[in-house]
Amino acid sequence: MKHLGYLVILFLLAANTCITGLLLLSAYSPCLTPAEHPVLSCLGLAFPIFALLNGGFLFLWLCIRRYRPALLPLLGFLACLPQLRTYLPLNLHTGTLPEGSCKVLSYNIMGFADATKREGKSPILEYLKASDADVLCLQEYRTSGSGKNVSQKDVDRALADYPYHHIGHVGKSRANQVACYSKWPILSARELVTPSAYNGIMMYELKWGSDTLMLFNVHLESNKLTSSDKAVYENMLTDPEKETVKSGLRLLVRKLAEATALRAPQADTLAKRIAACPHRYIVVCGDFNDTPISYTHHTIARKLNDAFTDSGCGLGTSYNRNKFYFRIDNILASENLATYNCTVDRSIRASDHYPIWCHMAKKQ
């Protein structure tokens, strides 16, 4: 029996070593170039799974009073503390904001598709009107003048408190639009050209008091999962049979790897533009279509701080359909900006994304 006990301990230790190794590989997978390692660069998607399993082993070792093996999962967590904090920040919100602070809100509104007017009003427009944000960055912006759909006149009327706005086409197809509505003057607006047919980036110079804010409104390459692909994913979660999971994983990993490889040059282009920006204050916000542990996020945030990491709390899941529980919408700010109370607002579900907002102020 004693030898059997040792064998069980050795088996658990080997399993724990494997899980801790996968945890570290997923945590540092953003350092891999997607063009060279498309599949491995997607490992960040599994980071929370490996973190939970590693935590389970730590709990197990402590329960059976095997303290030396418990050092393995503990060291694994210590080695990826920055990634844990990025994925699951635990910050308290403050009720006191500094004088001169502003509010920035980003929202993928899905073309107002699920926001048809009810009793003459659009839920999304009512939300934006009541948000009291100084700057609104909207992705998948599309209006229509027919029937109950939201028209541009509806938007202009609802957002009359924003005297400055710009609506721009992005992507080679010119079929997608992003919009910026601002209470501050928009000094310039132009597209940052990236290799994408449908997605893209707009950059604006906004007059912020006596300073200029460089603002990037981002909608990066989507994962291009069809309705049937999403159904496969949901079936994997609800009916995890071996063959279903095996075939489903193969399909999803291939598609996600392809999308990751397409997003990488877009992230590279944006990172280079940020590095060359002549302005002191920089904000990047929008739909990255990638998780906080990804090449996309890692590359864009190289010289910026993640507002949700610094002032948010929890997972911050911003996509609300098909059981894809990830934070793919972000607000990033230059290091000379302090951010407060960053929130993924779950109070409205009219789009397939939740809006994300935060307060920010210039550091003294």
Image (tube, rainbow, N blue to C red):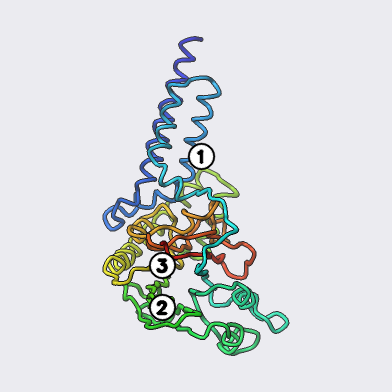
Judge the density around disc 1: few (<14), some (14-19), many (≥20) Cα neighbours within 10 Å. few
User: Quarter-wise, where is residue 192 in the image?
Assistant: bottom left
Gap between marks 3 and 2, in whole Å? 13 Å
- Residue at position x 29%, y 64% in the image: 268
N-term-proximal mark, 3 vs 2: 2
- Residue at position x 36%, y 75% in the image: 197
**Residue type indicated by callout 3:** Val
**Residue type indicated by callout 2:** Leu
Q: Is residue 141 visible?
A: yes
Gap between marks 1 and 2, in whole Å? 43 Å
Q: Secondary structure at mark 1?
A: helix
Mark whose residue sits in front, 1 or 3: 3
Judge the density around disc 2: few (<14), some (14-19), many (≥20) Cα neighbours within 10 Å. many
Kindly identify which numbered label has been placed on residue 91. Answer: none
Contact flag, marks 3 and 2 (Cβ < 8 Å): no
Q: Nearer the viewer, residue 321 or 117?
A: 117
Q: How far from the left and from the top, in percent, is residue 227?
A: 53, 65
Kindly identify which numbered label has been placed on residue 284. Answer: 3
328 lies left or right of 187: right
Contact flag, marks 1 and 3 (Cβ < 8 Å): no
Q: Nearer the viewer, residue 237 or 344?
A: 344
Q: Secondary structure at mark 2?
A: strand
Q: How far from the left and from the top, in percent, is residue 160?
A: 58, 85
Q: Which residue is mark 1?
A: 52
Gap between marks 1 and 3, in whole Å? 31 Å
**Residue type indicated by callout 1:** Leu
Q: Which residue is mark 2?
A: 206
